[in-house]
Amino acid sequence: MFRQVLGKTLGFVGYTIQYGCIAHCAFEYIGEFVVCSGPSMEPTIVNHDIVFNERMSRHLFKIEKGDIVIAKSPFDPHMNICKRVVGLEGDKVCTGAPSDLFKTHTYVPKGHVWLEGDNLTNSSDSRNYGPIPYALIRGRVCLKLWPPHSFGTLSESPTKRIIKNPNNSD
């Protein structure tokens, strides 16, 4: 009797560990569901929207200008941020607000990206903390899942601050 209970318990623990490993690999290498909070990406993503964050683009170095990404905060490693990629390494980006009289620019260093929120007046982003290392990017947001009426792929930046390179245009 004791052996039978022990055998079933160990079998259950073994299956639990196997499924836990599969789930971990799926969330780490394929993607995850993220509940977004804060006003920085409005109107594209609003408070409590649920998005799917795919991880393959990051691992394959396929992040492009205009993509919305989830990244680790450069100040708090326990917090994630959701921003739009405005510049990749080597790009010249505007560091000021659109209303600034004198525009200031900088170049994105090698191995870094320039991130900005779509809501420029209410976003803490690369204009505040500078370019962030590519390694802090967790994945690319590819779908909005909730609320149901806005299900689908995400729109282009409403700020029009992303300038595609002429040699990359289709």
Image: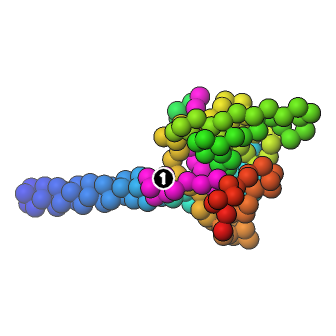
State the image coordinates of residue 43 (x, y, percent, origin top left). Answer: 79, 55
- Locate the C terminus by quadrant: bottom right
State the image coordinates of residue 100 (x, y, percent, origin top left). Answer: 89, 34
> Could you tell me which residue is drawn at 86 percent across and 41 percent down?
98
- Colouring convention used in this rendered image of the protein: rainbow
**Residue at the limit of the structure toward the front, as seen here:** 167
Residue 74 in sight:
yes
> Could you tell me which residue is drawn at 67 percent across and 63 percent down?
169
> Could you tell me which residue is drawn at 72 percent across and 40 percent down?
93
State the image coordinates of residue 4 (x, y, percent, origin top left). Answer: 10, 61
As for residue 24 lying within the magenta part, the answer is: no
| Label 1 packing within 10 angstroms: few (<14), some (14-19), many (20+) | few
Start-end of magenta stretch: 56-75
- Locate the N terminus by quadrant: bottom left
Closer to us: 64 or 50: 64
- Residue 27, by quadrant, is bottom left
To which residue does mark 1 refer?
Answer: 61
Closer to us: 154 or 146: 154
Q: Secondary structure at mark 1?
A: loop
**Left or right position of 57 against 21:** right
**Left or right position of 26 against 113:** left
**Left or right position of 158 against 167:** right
Q: Examine the rendered structure and indicate whether residue 105 appears above or below residue 21.
A: above
**Left or right position of 124 against 50:** right
Amino acid type for the residue under numbered disc 1? Phe
State the image coordinates of residue 56 (x, y, percent, origin top left). Answer: 46, 58
Q: Examine the rendered structure and indicate whether residue 43 appears above or below residue 104.
A: below
Q: Examine the rendered structure and indicate whether residue 170 appears above or below residue 157.
A: below
> Could you tell me which residue is drawn at 79 percent across and 32 percent down?
104
